[in-house]
Image: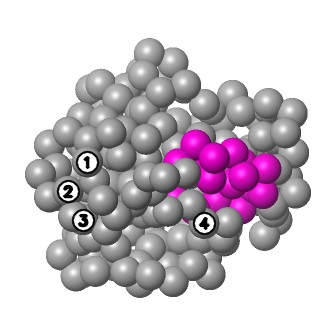
Amino acid sequence: MENTDLTYWDNRYLTGDTGWDMGRVSPPLQAYIDQVEDRNLRILIPGAGNSYEAAWLQEQGFRHVTVIDIAPSLIAQLRQTFAGTAVQVLEADFFTHAGTYDLVLEQTFFCAIPPSQREAYVRHMHTLIRPGGRLAGVLFDRTFTQEGPPFGGSKEEYEQLFAPLFTFKTLERCYNSHPARQGTELFINFIPI
């Protein structure tokens, strides 16, 4: 998978090269999670990283949370972190993962995959979310000067990518981003067609 293979990501975690890590749950995602009432939703967090969102979901009583990532050292750490909880930790490739979810939370995964894989992301995401389910989270609304990851994007690009398979409940600038990301994130809430 180009530069998104497990060795690349495992090395990033092993060397602590995780500049995207805010050290806490993303404020827009926390605000979204806080208004979700059904604690029995089946929730997926792909490319989970340090999984602050999964920890927040677990603390709030959500019972069916799955996190997936391809970095073996990260997965080992997450399995320790979430041992004895309802959070299921999988070492898996998003693009081959099978399952059915009510909600998928997007936080830094989309921007970590090369733009050449974005159409495959949209198609596979559509297969993972049950009818009436949601894809919610944040996408970058900016370009990056260095070669990624992360890879940027724009509202117009996302509209073209997602419109064939999703309807947009929300696609707008985040009002509550982390200070380091202020003015560079869009909140999405998409429903599969």
Badge nearest the viewer, 1 or 4 = 1
Using the rendered view, name the quadrant where residue 186 is placed.
top left
Please state which amino acid type lies under the numbered disc 3: Leu
Name the residue that disc number 1 marks. 61
**Marks 2/3: CA distance?**
6 Å
Q: Are marks 2 and 4 in contact (CB under 8 Å)?
A: no
Name the residue that disc number 2 marks. 39
Image quarter where the C terminus lies is: bottom left
Residue 45 appears at what percent x and percent y? 47, 57
Residue 79 appears at what percent x and percent y? 62, 53
Name the residue that disc number 4 marks. 90
Q: Does 116 lie within the magenta span?
A: no
**Marks 2/4: CA distance?**
21 Å
Question: Which residues fall within the magenta stretch?
Answer: 67-82
Badge nearest the viewer, 3 or 1 = 1
Q: Are marks 2 and 1 in contact (CB under 8 Å)?
A: yes
**Marks 4/3: CA distance?**
18 Å
Q: Which of the two discs, 3 and 1, labels the residue nearer the N terminus?
A: 3
**Marks 2/1: CA distance?**
6 Å
Q: Which secondary structure is most common in the magenta stretch?
A: helix
98 to 3, vertically: above or below: below
Q: Secondary structure at mark 4?
A: strand
Using the rendered view, name the quadrant where residue 17 is placed.
top right
Q: Residue at x 35, y 29 (%)?
A: 27
Q: Does 68 lie within the magenta span?
A: yes
